[in-house]
Amino acid sequence: MKRIPKRTTVTAALPYANGPIHIGHLAGCYLPADIYVRYLRMRGRDVAFICGSDEHGMAITVKARKEGTTPQAVVDTYHALMGKAFRDFGISFDVYSRTSSAKHHEVAQGFFKNLYDKGVFEARETLQYFDPEAQQFLADRTIVGTCPKCENEEAYGDQCEKCGSTLSPTELINPRSTLSGAAPELRPTTNWFLPLDALAPKIRSYIDAHSDWKPTVYGQCKSWLDAGDGLQARSMTRDLDWGVPVPVEGAEGKVLYVWFDAPLGYITATQELFGADWEKWWKDEDTDIVHFIGKDNIVFHCIIFPAILMEHGGYQLPAEVPANEFLNLEGRKLSTSKNWAVWLHEYLEDFPGKQDELRYVLCATMPESKDNDFTWSDFQTRVNSELVAVMGNLVNRVMVLNYKYYGGIAPAIRSLVTNDDQLVLEAIGAQRAAVESALEAYRFRDALSEAMQLARLGNKYLADQEPWKLVKVDAERTETVMAVATQVVAALGTLLEPFLPTSAEKIRRMMGISEANWSALDGSVLVSAGHPLGASELLFDKVEDEAVERQRAKLAERATLVVAEVAAEGVTPVAALDPLKAEVAFDQFAALDLRVARIVAAERVPKADKLLKLTVDSGLDVRTVLSGIAEHFAPEEVVGKDVLLLANLAPRVMRGVTSEGMLLMAEDPATGRLDFVAPGAGMPVGATVR
Ligand SMILES: [Zn+2]
């Protein structure tokens, strides 16, 4: 059983103020944090939900330079846009601060001065890359080059996004300035380093005490500690003019490293929220600090920030860091700079009022333990077949029948409660418990699915009891059935609150309940007989094919633009195409039996969202082939198509069906769209490909 802390300080990674918020940010960190916080509040726990914009760092200056404006103007724009997006999606921060505030500069400088006075830092004169055209030192995102570990040619000066390695600019092969494109030259400069190498034993014992963290988080920390060269000292200052000035003598023209100041932004924001009463949220032993982040921030939250707090002293160290993996979009990595994203503010323009639909789909597909993919067809399927068909249907039926039979007054449990009634009433408490244990373990997908399970049970109960038939023969029994179903709907008005706050509130309004009450999901009567219900409201409506098509078209257009832009810059769009595979001998190719074949029948495979079961005429025989194209094609779209079949692939059993062969598909690198590789017209079925 997990210890229950006296209070919990929940932070969500400070979003970087150089672009709007997209679905990957939401799914990676803000949505799970919000669900968790809403849940803690429902349990009556003392919780503070802290966030703000991260407004320093090289990328801001790069963007300002590109747009011919000031860094302050850039962060002002995005701070406002991000804050609005969070509010619109119900992300219920208690405070949303920003790191360019005077207050934050004071806090960050105080921390630096504290460590400096204790002699924690090592001042080192090093050779750093200097851009002779832009007349400034380069670091982090102002310098790119080839990663020494994975040969990615676009690795940044602080990190390779492809292999995840942390880097320093001098490790890059063929470095170049992103400010001017010039080849930089090395010049001497003094900076202050946090000696992570010397602090490694302390950091190791902290990490070792948290072997219960998510395997991905704990594993990443261990791999840094155990790497051949171990932890390396890292510079906590930068030669730059945008940021928190380094508050010591001889540091003119230098600012704090953005990853020194950004996590301290959590502390600044807490001070803004609580005033003089802030300290217990960071210093009491009874406080748990929980950082929600994406996996690219693990090193900063699990190693560097704790090291800073340890050396300062007096602070609690992060208790939990439930980092998520990445969400992809239609098979490709989300990217702010490449505009490959679903932006929250644009989503709301296209789907006004449908915040909960996106929260639902992102929670149901959250990249908790591995990267996951968001596709518009999955969005449509989940909204239509889960939110509309299950949740919306149950609530709507209960409202319609309660108005029809009882004039909108809650019915009473009259006749003896049968076993079926009892089971569905008990499910309220059981599903609450299941949601709780999943959320306590940061398993958000499971938690949502357990909450939905109550709606499924409610639907099944109504379908089994058929009150619309029963009402003609047994009024008393009908009233009991409707009263039980009404309790289930009322319970959903609370159980869904952490996940779908807008819809949960609508349900409560329909039930005439003013507030969510988690502890009442224990078998208490949630809506008393005779209680007036509210007016019916629409919960969810169907996402039509055209809406999904429009979103796909929008992405396809952007992908084309990106490729065109990259081509105009004279660089091969390597990111868009798979690299060339290793050479094969002719014999290896000749061993493949490829044939022209025709799809003669197609059907979906139950419980397999991605698979179509195809009946294929190969000319030699008629066989079954399972193909992972159900998200791209409806069965009726593929029947009659002539395709290329790999006919001598070893049979494979999937979902209890034997698949004999494989159809050749091409994948559009820009959109992830799949299509068949088709033979020329008139080529007979059974013809060999050579
Ligand atoms: Zn790399």
Image (cartoon, rainbow, N blue to C red):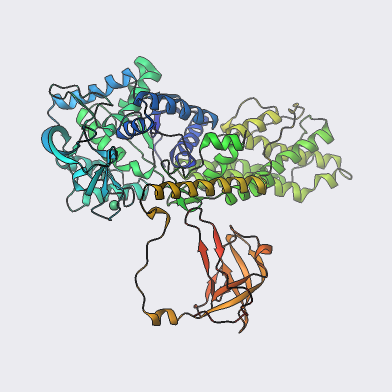
Q: Is residue 595 above or below residue 231?
A: below
Looking at the rendered image, the quarter that the N terminus falls into is top left
- In the image, taking residue 660 as reference, residue 102 lies left or right, namely left
- In the image, taking residue 601 as reference, residue 609 lies left or right, namely left
Residue at image x 27%, y 55%?
Answer: 151
The extreme top residue here reads 276
Q: Is residue 83 above or below residue 453?
A: above
Is residue 264 visible in this depiction of the protein? yes
Residue at image x 55%, y 79%?
Answer: 595
Front residue of 225/9: it is 225
Q: Quadrant of residue 486?
A: top right
Expressed as whole percent of the image width and height from the top left, the position of residue 392 reads 69, 41
Expressed as whole percent of the image width and height from the top left, the position of residue 190 reads 13, 32
- In the image, taking residue 547 as reference, residue 158 lies left or right, namely left
Front residue of 68/574: it is 68
The extreme right residue here reads 472
Is residue 414 visible in this depiction of the protein? no
- In the image, taking residue 210 as reference, residue 422 lies left or right, namely right
Expressed as whole percent of the image width and height from the top left, the position of residue 600 reads 67, 73
Q: Quadrant of residue 109?
A: top left
Residue at image x 50%, y 58%?
Answer: 668
Expressed as whole percent of the image width and height from the top left, the position of residue 515 reads 61, 26
Front residue of 273/604: it is 604
Q: Is residue 348 above or below residue 635?
A: above
